[in-house]
Image (spheres, rainbow, N blue to C red):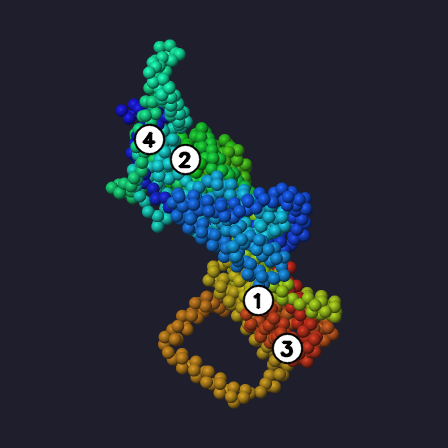
Amino acid sequence: MNDELSTQTPLGPRRTVVLVDAPQQWVRHPADLVGAIFALLFTVFSGFLAVYAQTTTLAVTSDVRTATSDVIQTVLLVPINVLEGLVSFVLPAFLFGFTLLRRRWRTIGTALLAALIAVGIAQIISMVAERWWPQSVFTSQYVEALTIQSFISLLPYVSVICAFLTVMGSSNRSQIVRIGWWLLGAVLVFSVLQGQQTITGALITVSLGMSAGMFTRWMIGSEPDRATGKSLVDLARRAQIDLVELVRVDELPKDEEIKAWNVITTAPIGYSDLQGLAQLRKFLTSIVSSETAEAANEPNAIHTGTLSNSAAQSTHTAEIDAQHIVSAAETLQAADSISDAPHIDAHSLRESACKNYTYASSNEVSRNYIATDIRGEKFHVLVLDEDQKILGLLEDIWERLRLKLAFRRRPQTLAEAAEQMTLMILSTERAGIAPERFWSTSGNESSILVVNRAISDPALSQETAETVTDAHLDAFWADLLHAHQQGLCHGSIESNHVTVTGQGLQLRAWQSGSINAPDTARRIDLAQTVSMFASVFGVQRAVASLKRSIPLDQIVALAPFLQRTIMPSQTREAFKGNKKYQELRDALQLEVPETSSAEPVALRRFSIKTIVTVTIGVVAVYLLLGSMNFEDVSAAIQEASVVWMVSSFIAGLVTYIGAGITLKAYTPERLPLRDSILVQVAASVVTLVAPAGIGPAALNLRFLQKRGVATTAALATVSLVQLAQLVTTLLLLFVLTLVSGQITSFSAPSAPTLTVIGIVLVVIGTLLLIPKLRAWIWAKIKPSLEQVWPRMVWLGTHPQRILLGLVGSVIMSAAFVLCFGFALKSFGYELPIVTLAVTYLVANSVGSAVPSPGGIGPVEAALTGGLAIAGIPYSVAFSTAVLYRLFTFWGRVPLGWVALRIADRKNII
């Protein structure tokens, strides 16, 4: 009977649908966090306007105020006061009461907390500004705005109302909230025009309130803006599925439970115009009302009407049919409900669906379900949710900022995403690239469903490489080339997006692809495919399949795109670094020599390494400008000889050669001397943000790793270089002291000094008698010794490398001494070479021992003191130290920055 009635109504047959899903919970919407960050950035931007563009903002405000002051003072004064009262008291009270009546307790709590946070932030900024920047323009404008807005002491109502409206606007799409924003904007405009506050002061308080509201809303959470429960089931029926079961198959967080519900629904199967049902109700209501009125006016009259008997009978029959349809529809609709189903094993249903049916996830799809209809047919339901759209938008923005090539076009709205998905699915089906699986779509304001027939074929990531033949690989390449000939590209080819069928490999998840794709997108598809095959089947098999199936010109074109940057996440995880990509490129060059000249395409605008490089440069410039005394430097340069200054600078540059030779000497692997020297030059900028000696060591380590040296061996080499430099310095000091005859002038330590030394040695010896302490010390030093020892053994069998390293260290030390001596000579003073060398080596070693960035401060003080002890006037000694540091530290920053960029571009570091 119900089915007969349903055929006469716009509703569908009554069904009890089993829904297996995660319970609806308040969620943290990413859009709230993004909005809070942008509002905070706008607050900072408004503050900068207040400080650095005060003339412009005040001039604009003054001009508009002058033009409108008469109207405001005479005509609009009373309406403005009434409007301010409405916004200040009536609007918050009305919104609070309205939300209270709807029993939205959590929304009320969130709004009150947001208001308190807005007040706290506003007052904290006020106190900090008055404490630290009392004379700032920002402080005066901001405090003035708070004072004007604080009808109650310490309560800036603009920030409070903005926070309140922001939170209230999330709980419902209320027209009242939208009107509230317009009223608040009008009040602020009139307040600025009346001269009560400035534009920047108003903007700062508004953005602060919005930031507090959105951050609080994100922190506590809000209702999900998506179809769930019965509304989700109704959407599935609208997609022409006579549903009996709907099971969630997504990977869910561990703390999220799975439940089952029984949903009794009579929603239409397919799209149905329910407005007709509403019109019938209206028609019947008007008929009953008119008949009741006529019966009241003529109680004894016989109602004949003006129609003929047949017309009257026809009208009466139509009324009966309408009543029958409306009555049947209301009977069916009255049964719609949703209730818990604890007797249903939700976990078993979910595990069975996940095991038997595979799906390919994508960033555009928020949820995935397996639906079963009355006939037992299975469908894959992809759900696109409005509250997750911001994630796709942010990813698109990040991709456009990070990559120079935009090889995918991402839709901007939910409807556009669904349309693109549908178009791509239908295009691939028409081209014969994918089987016919598309079923239907449906949607509402918050969610859109795209329905395909479910597939049970396993994904390539779940299969072993042996189950796939070379013929299957070649057929896959042929399908991909056919898609490219149709103007289609996929854009995200990974093993999860490929299924293993009885006929071979099938590429799916085309919904994120593109139509009319450019050549770059097709080359990226080919690069992603060969990389995926290499990760699953091995490099040699992947390259062999590529060579068999792809024309030579396309192989040469795809070679520059074999880069980790453009690979899907699963392929990147399988490769784990750039070493396997290099192996793939090497194998490709071996099989196809024409690709050997192909240089990788510069795909990235920037990377983490670029961000670190820029950060180092900015910090270096900041430290450089903050540490330099420009008056001292200027005075020193004006008094110095230009010839000797140039000589000093050139001598300082020779140190790079010595450092490069030392690194090359102590490294068994082949290092080009040119690259080694370039890295030493690049280290000049790193020394600004690292203690003396640490920056070059870190950059050398990175350089060795990029050259394929294992991390342990690279650490050992860098440690050996540092140790060799220390030993060379000590040897030079000993030799120079011996040559100068000063060794005989050293007197023995005093008795108290010898006593202290003896006590220290006795204490150390006693402690070393404790076995556990010895074991602990050995455990600490053993790893370092194990790192360095293999290199020491290797050096012991290569004495020419020891000699080469010694020569490099001597060149570096001698160049520094000459640079220091020429700097002293530029002021007309000089010291014997031995005295100069001893003074420099001792002073520089003492100054570098202090852990400050680049040795700034201690090195200058030590060099100045050393020269003063050697008999140089203090003013000349200080000027010499400043000039020397200018040539060996500050002046090297531009060279280091250029070298760092060159080394980055050549992929040396």
**Helix, strand, or loop for circle 1?**
loop
Q: Amino acid at mark 4?
A: Gln
Residue 218 horizontal/vertical position (percent): 45, 49
Q: Residue at x 65, y 66 (%)?
A: 628
Residue nearest the observer in this picture, 129 or 547: 129
Q: Residue furthest bottom?
A: 751
**Mark 4 Cα-neighbour bin, 10 Å: few <14, some 14–19, many ≥20:** some
Nearest to N terminus: mark 1 or mark 4: 4
Give the label on residue 333, or none: 4
Q: Is residue 87 above or below residue 900?
A: above
Give the label on residue 866, or none: 3
Q: CA distance from mark 3 to mark 4?
A: 96 Å
Question: Which of pointers 3 and 4 indicates the residue nearer the eye?
Answer: 4
Question: Which of pointers 4 and 2 indicates the residue nearer the eye?
Answer: 4
**Helix, strand, or loop for circle 4?**
helix
**Mark 2 Cα-neighbour bin, 10 Å: few <14, some 14–19, many ≥20:** many
Residue nearest the observer in this picture, 650 or 806: 650
Q: Amino acid at mark 1?
A: Pro
Residue nearest the observer in this picture, 565 or 611: 611
Q: CA distance from mark 1 to mark 3?
A: 21 Å
Q: Amino acid at mark 3?
A: Gly
Q: Residue at x 44, y 30 (%)?
A: 426
Q: Residue at x 47, y 67 (%)?
A: 788
